[in-house]
Image: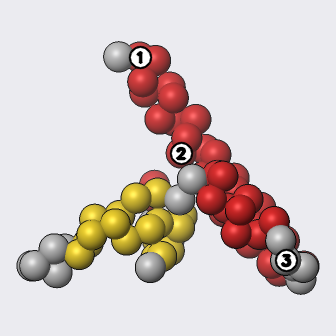
């Protein structure tokens, strides 16, 4: 299952990795390779192309931030 968050600092598509007994969800951010894989083998409308690029951009930005954080450690 996927969810989309719109809060600017954490906006993007996430995979629900776990739902705990108390109802809390553990979310994993969508990876850029997952976005490419989802959209690679199908025809897209103009809106679909825009959605794909938006999701790809958000995923790539998160991944770049993760790499920068790892380098600083």
Of the image marks 1 and 2, the number of the one nearer the N terminus:
2
User: Which quadrant, please, contains the C terminus?
Assistant: top left
Q: Helix or strand or loop: what does disc 3 sit on?
A: loop
For disc 2, the neighbor class at 10 Å (few under 14, some 14 to 19, many from 20) is some
Q: Which residue is mark 2?
A: 62
CA gap, disc 1 and disc 2: 15 Å
Residue 54 visible within the image: no
Asked whether the beta carbons under mark 3 and mark 1 sit within 8 Å of each other, the answer is: no
In the drawing, does residue 45 fall left or right of residue 25? right
- Label 2, secondary structure: give it: helix
Does the rendering let one see residue 5?
Answer: yes
Q: Nearer the viewer, mark 3 or mark 2?
A: 3
Mark 1 lies on residue: 72
Q: Position of residue 22 (x, y in %)?
A: 9, 79
**Rendered residue at 23%/75% (across/down):** 19
Q: Which residue is mark 3?
A: 42
Whether label 3 touches label 2, CB < 8 Å: no
Tell me the CA gap for discs 3 and 2: 25 Å
Question: Residue drawn 28% across and 65% down?
Answer: 26
Q: Is residue 52 found left or right of 23 in the rendered image?
A: right
Identify the image quadrant of residue 61.
top right
């Amino acid at each position: 299952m996927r969810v989309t968050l719109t809060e600017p600092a954490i906006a993007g598509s996430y995979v629900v990795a776990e739902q705990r007994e108390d109802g809390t969800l553990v979310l994993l951010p969508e990876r850029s390779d997952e976005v490419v894989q989802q959209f690679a083998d199908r025809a897209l409308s103009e809106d679909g192309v825009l959605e794909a690029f938006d999701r790809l951009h958000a995923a790539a930005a998160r991944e770049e931030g993760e790499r920068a954080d790892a380098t600083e450690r």
